[in-house]
Image: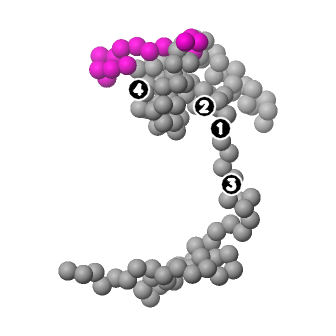
Amino acid sequence: MRSTEKSPKFFNNNDNLYALYGEGRFTLRFPSSSQELYEFKYRDRMSIISDILKTVTNSSGKGKRKTQIMQSANLNFDQVNKYLSFLISNGYIRMERSEMHKGSVYRATSKGLNFVKLLEAENLRIM
């Protein structure tokens, strides 16, 4: 059985991309300058560390699993491993076995909690 729907046809006119699909017409507007296309800024290492520490701190004492840290800090597996090993070796977080999760969870140490407070105070001072 073949579908009777046709695929959309695209054409460009004055920095707008138009899509014709059946009877409807959709307009997709793209930024006119290349400056607007590259508005996303990469995070520096301190903001990534801050995101991880805030995630682990906001766990209300239960700790966070590695997958939860990856998702909330928006990191991939290799990145989260690198940052977690750095934070553990410097005493900002600790890894513990959890019977409830049947695996490892990560919790902030007092040094990590103080560092998060310092980062937040510095961020407020800058703004």
Name the element at disc 1: loop
Measure the alpha-carbon separation of dots 3 and 2. 20 Å
Range of residues picked out in magenta? 89-104
- Circles 1 and 2: CB atoms closer than 8 Å: yes
Residue at the spot of label 2: 48
**Rendered location of residue 71, percent (x, y):** 46, 37
Name the element at disc 4: loop
Q: Amino acid at mark 1?
A: Arg
Q: Amino acid at mark 2?
A: Ile
User: Can the viewer see residue 65 in this picture?
Assistant: yes
**Mark identifier at residue 65:** 4
Outermost bottom residue = 23
Choose between 91 and 77: the one closer to the eye. 77
**Rendered location of residue 92, percent (x, y):** 57, 15
Disc 3 residue crowd, few under 14, some 14–19, many 20+, Cα 10 Å: few
Give the vertical position of 3 relative to 91 (above or below): below
Residue at the spot of label 3: 38
Q: Residue at 48%, 13% (x, y): give it.
A: 94
Residue 90 included in the magenta stretch of the image: yes
Task: Work out whether mark 3 precedes mark 1 in sequence or the reverse, and give the earlier one.
Answer: 3
- Circles 3 and 1: CB atoms closer than 8 Å: no
Name the element at disc 3: loop
Residue 74 appears left or right of 122: left
Q: Quadrant of the C terminus?
A: top right
Residue 31 appears left or right of 26: right
